[in-house]
Image (spheres, rainbow, N blue to C red):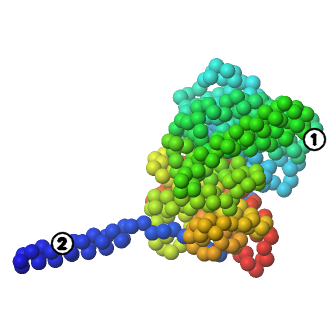
């Protein structure tokens, strides 16, 4: 009896110790609860822009270098990075005339690249992911190819530019856009690699949602610029078809997955930002979009020691990586994706200040993420919490490597990643357009 009691007491002690241990180790929820606090000053933004522009139109080739990091083999022109960065250049500039030279040079490069025989495919280089600078030849080393996001992304960037230019530029752009979109119509269900160049599928959310935008915009473009009614109809038809199929990417829990073989992925957040057309599909305050942001925030809060330390110190902010289980360079938070999450929060703030409504169930999810009532200022504060946390780890002025070490917070992987600068500039651009709308007393 006695010995039983002792054993029982010992067992209780062990249990108590393991509960205490468990409590200490159990993940703490991260919070985005913050008052607005502009993460980058005007001087910071000017520096970021300087580093960004230094990577565009390299040696007058029109090409965008992904990063000048030669040691890590990033000094190539990736189709995706280039198209996204040249679009960011337009979105974030006040003076379109000042960027005309770089845009024209990039357009010439796109024209050249589409006529480039592709040694990897035996046809043309339309869905090649990566080219050498400055000769513009497709990279011939082993690579995850093809990557099918290029044609849509390039078309979106070209059309944005053409809309602001004279007739001759519009016609020139149409010649390229027509080829990109015809290719999408014929190939949008074909197999390819994801934007992280790792897994294969014929149905990535990132690829489909950005193609959808290219096709809808292209439909209007075909009609107004080229009076090509047949193409206008065919582009619209495919875009409608893609729209129908996109709902398959919504899980039963209401969040959006990237592909069957890579479900939880911040590529989806980047897609929400890049592919939005303000037409109600995956709108920033829709249930799916809010749920996806909450899901990813929760996943990375638990996955990164850095986020846990932030939460345990009662500091706001979450850093986002590509997907849970990533192992590239150890699997770390990415600056471009943290900026993308901040951009989404700023877009939500903007939508709310423009009078968008939010369903009660969605509001509850968003309130949980923000740790306070949903309002323009709490959404701005949420985005700021993310970017202020990124800023904390910038130890070389405004220079930004691709990643931030998940444990030590040190900058990791490629230096001066152009896509980082593009996404931070876009985030600040949206933020400023919202903070301009609300009284200065509310926004710090
Ligand atoms: C694996 C990485 O995850 C991918 O993003 C990268 O492009 C390739 N390796 C090549 O470095
Ligand atoms: C690796 C990333 O995974 C990919 O998305 C990107 O295009 C290249 N690096 C170049 O920045």
User: Which disc is residue 422 wearing?
Assistant: none
335 sits to left or right of 186: left
**Mark 1 Cα within 10 Å, few/some/many (few <14, many 20+)?**
few
At a point 68% along the width and 37% down the height, the residue shown is 150
Q: Which residue lies at the image location 57% right of the left edge and 73% below the top edge?
A: 371
Q: Is residue 279 above or below residue 147?
A: below
Would you say residue 108 is visible in this rendering?
no
Label 2 element class: helix
Above or below, comparing residue 154 to residue 403 in the picture: above
Image marks 1 and 2: residues in contact by CB distance under 8 Å: no
Kindly identify which numbered label has been placed on residue 11: 2
Choose top left, top right, bottom left or bottom right for residue 140.
Answer: top right
Left or right: 72 with respect to 282?
left
Above or below, 253 relative to 8: above
Image quarter where the C terminus lies is bottom right
Q: Position of residue 304 (x, y in %)?
A: 47, 59
> In the rendered view, does 124 fall on the left or right side of 111?
left
Q: Residue 166 carries which label?
A: 1
The image shows residue 239 at horizontal and vertical percentages of: 73, 40
| Image location (x, y in percent) of residue 173 | 84, 35
Q: Is residue 199 above or below residue 390?
A: above
Q: Residue 211: name its quadrant.
A: top right
């Amino acid at each position: 009896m006695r010995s039983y009691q002792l054993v029982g007491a010992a067992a209780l002690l062990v249990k108590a110790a393991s509960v205490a241990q468990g409590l200490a180790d159990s993940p703490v929820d991260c919070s985005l609860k913050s008052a607005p606090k502009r993460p980058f000053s005007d001087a910071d933004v000017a520096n970021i822009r300087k580093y960004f522009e230094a990577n565009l139109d390299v040696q007058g080739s029109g090409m965008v270098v992904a990063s000048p990091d030669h040691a890590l083999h990033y000094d190539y022109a990736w189709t995706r990075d280039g198209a996204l960065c040249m679009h960011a250049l337009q979105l974030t500039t006040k003076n379109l005339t000042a960027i005309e030279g770089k845009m024209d040079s990039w357009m010439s490069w796109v024209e050249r690249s589409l006529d480039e025989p592709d040694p990897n495919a035996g046809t043309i280089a339309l869905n090649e992911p990566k080219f050498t600078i400055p000769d513009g030849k497709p990279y011939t080393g082993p690579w995850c190819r093809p990557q099918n996001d290029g044609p849509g992304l390039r078309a979106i960037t070209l059309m944005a530019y053409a809309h602001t230019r004279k007739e001759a530029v519009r016609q020139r752009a149409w010649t390229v856009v027509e080829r990109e979109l015809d290719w999408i119509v014929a190939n949008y269900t074909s197999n390819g690699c994801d934007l992280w160049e790792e897994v294969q599928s014929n149905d990535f959310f990132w690829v489909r949602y950005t193609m959808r935008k290219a096709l809808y915009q292209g439909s209007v473009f075909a009609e107004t610029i080229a009076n090509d009614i047949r193409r206008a109809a065919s582009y619209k038809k495919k875009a409608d078809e893609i729209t129908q199929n996109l709902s398959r990417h919504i899980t039963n829990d209401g969040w959006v997955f990237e592909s069957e073989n890579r479900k939880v992925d911040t590529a989806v957040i980047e897609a929400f930002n890049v592919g939005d057309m303000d037409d109600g599909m995956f709108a920033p305050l829709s249930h799916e979009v809010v749920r996806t942001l909450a899901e990813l925030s929760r996943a990375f809060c638990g996955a990164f020691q850095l986020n846990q330390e932030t939460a345990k110190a009662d500091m706001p902010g979450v850093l986002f990586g590509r997907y849970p289980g990533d192992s590239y360079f150890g699997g770390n938070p990415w600056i471009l994706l943290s900026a993308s999450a901040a951009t989404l929060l700023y877009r939500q703030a903007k939508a709310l200040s423009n009078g968008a409504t939010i369903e009660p169930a969605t509001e509850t999810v968003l309130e949980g993420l923000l740790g306070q009532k949903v309002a323009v200022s709490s959404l701005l504060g949420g985005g700021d919490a993310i970017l202020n946390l990124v800023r904390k780890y910038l130890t070389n002025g405004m220079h930004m490597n691709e990643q931030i070490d998940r444990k030590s917070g040190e900058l990791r992987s490629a230096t001066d990643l152009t896509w980082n600068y593009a996404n931070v500039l876009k985030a600040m651009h949206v933020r400023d357009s919202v903070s301009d709308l609300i009284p200065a007393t509310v926004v710090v």
